[in-house]
Image (tube, grey):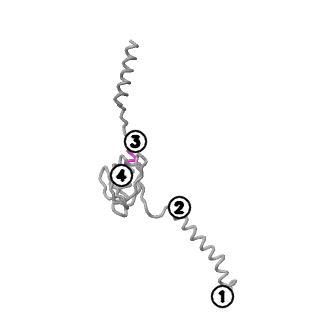
Amino acid sequence: MFRKTFAVMILVVLLLSAFQIQPLQAQTKNDNQLIGKAREKVQEIGTGKKARVEVKLQNNKKLKGYISAVSTDSFTVTDSETGATQTLNYTDVKQVKKRGGLSPLTLGIIAGAAVAAIIVGVTVIKPVLCDGGAGC
């Protein structure tokens, strides 16, 4: 009895591997959340040449361009330089980022430089130009 069961199990494993049958993977809750976030972000950004995005796909490929069309299960990204379009399903998208504008780091650097320029102007340049405080 044990030999027959063992032989049948080995036969099944060999047949499955010969035909390369793999078990299906169901979408998890995380996948559904990623799809929802991507759809929401695309809706928020909108369409047109000013709707510039950087899209990271599930296979870690990145696309840059602008959103030219949106539907319920996909959206189209057009490359600004070449004009090539690519329609992406939300299931293939890992992340959508809006491009353009200044990043928070850049804004911080600009603000720091402005504050430093004011401090240097008040403490160093003004006394030199006013000749020690006479007439300023």
For residue 133, side relative to residue 42 (left or right): right
Give the prevailing secondary structure in the magenta stretch. Answer: helix
For residue 110, side relative to residue 33 (left or right): right
- Label 2 or label 1, whichever comes before in sequence order: 2
Name the disc covering residue 105, or none: 2
Name the disc covering residue 39, or none: 4
SS category of the residue bearing label 3: helix
SS category of the residue bearing label 1: loop
Q: Is residue 34 magenta?
A: yes
Q: Which residues are magenta?
A: 29-35
- Find disc 3 in the rendering and name its residue: 29
- Under mark 4, the amino acid is Arg
Viewer-closest of 50 and 72? 50
- Asked if disc 4 and disc 1 are in contact, CB closer than 8 Å, the reply is no
Q: Quadrant of the N terminus?
A: top left
Report, in whole angstroms, how far the alpha carbon at label 4 lies from the one at label 3: 15 Å
Q: Residues within 10 Å of mark 2 (few under 14, many from 20)?
A: few
Tell me which residue sits at (54%, 67%) in the image: 110
- What is the residue that sits farthest to the bottom in this orientation? 135
- Asked if disc 3 and disc 2 are in contact, CB closer than 8 Å, the reply is no
Name the disc covering residue 135, or none: 1
Report, in whole angstroms, how far the alpha carbon at label 3 lies from the one at label 1: 73 Å
Tell me which residue sits at (31%, 55%) in the image: 70
Q: Residues within 10 Å of mark 1 (few under 14, many from 20)?
A: few
- Under mark 3, the amino acid is Lys
